[in-house]
Amino acid sequence: MTSLYHRLDDSSRGQILKLLQRYGAMGIKDLRRELGMSDTAVRQQLRSLRADGLIRASNRVAQGPGRPGRVYELSEEARRLFARYSEDLVLNLYAELMADQGQDVVRRLLDRVGKRLAEQYQKEVTGELLHDKVRSLAAVLDGRGIMSDVSHEAELIILHEFSCPYHELAAAHREICDMEKNMIAEVLNADVELTNCMMDGYSGCSFTVRPSEKEQKLTTLVNTRF
């Protein structure tokens, strides 16, 4: 969730991340000089950033105008915050694929991509019962920066995504939403319906999850026997 809550803004946190991205590892005195803050204030921000997994500390010589001693540098998680042009690349690649191969080929490719993503998520999702699997998937998505939650309405299970991992792409190509829905269905081995979509003005996407028809028949058969 760090990518959702700690953007590269002009806050002290954001400025520290930008400095570490620009200059590499830096010590507290270097950061204090750049930021015009006290050592105590810098340490507080560094503790917070370390707790969130955005920076790491080591004992070595700082790159640039630094001194030997304890220095701080970006973690791999933080470096992903700077990858802001990936969506532009994906949008252009998608447009070229559509122009070169056509919609049918691109849809088939999306199906394959969705299945590949499902295989990755299935390795992390746990639980035997469907509602446990949905909660586990929500936790996995949450850990990847896709703010997620689960609610229940009567006998329905609803998975909520409050951020879209493909926002710009989905805004231009709604078939991406179908890929996400099908991927979730594959992971959960369940019937999934996209009931609310942020591309339609909702604050998030809601996926209604039901046991698959095959699962329902199996449950009915077991209950009948016992």
Image (cartoon, grey):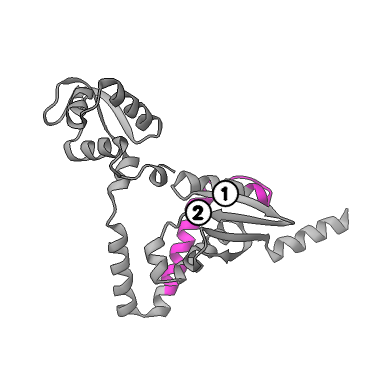
In terms of image quadrants, where is residue 85?
bottom left
Instruction: Tell me residue 94's x, y (percent).
Output: 33, 70
Residue placed under numbered mark 2 in the picture: 162
For marks 2 and 1, the one nearer the N-term is 1
Q: CA distance from mark 2 to mark 1?
A: 8 Å
Q: Is residue 66 above or below residue 216?
A: above
Say if mark 2 contacts mark 1, CB within 8 Å: yes
Instruction: Tell me residue 3's x, y (percent).
Output: 38, 45
Residue 188 seen from this side: yes
For the point 25% across and 22% down, which residue is it?
38
- Stretch of the chain drawn in magenta: 107-132
For the point 17% across and 27% down, which residue is it?
33
Q: Is residue 158 left or right of residue 35?
A: right
Q: Residues within 10 Å of mark 1 (few under 14, many from 20)?
A: some
Residue placed under numbered mark 1 in the picture: 149
For the point 19% across and 23% down, which residue is it?
29
Q: Is residue 5 above or below residue 178?
A: above
Q: How many marks?
A: 2
In terms of image quadrants, where is residue 24?
top left
For the point 29% across and 57% down, which residue is it?
86
Instruction: Tell me residue 194's x, y (percent).
Output: 57, 65
Q: Amino acid at mark 1?
A: Asp
Residue 145 among magenta residues: no
Classify mark 2: helix, strand or loop.
loop
Q: Is residue 73 left or right of residue 5?
A: left
Q: Is residue 206 left or right of residue 163?
A: right
Residue 125 seen from this side: no
Q: Residues within 10 Å of mark 2 (few under 14, many from 20)?
A: some
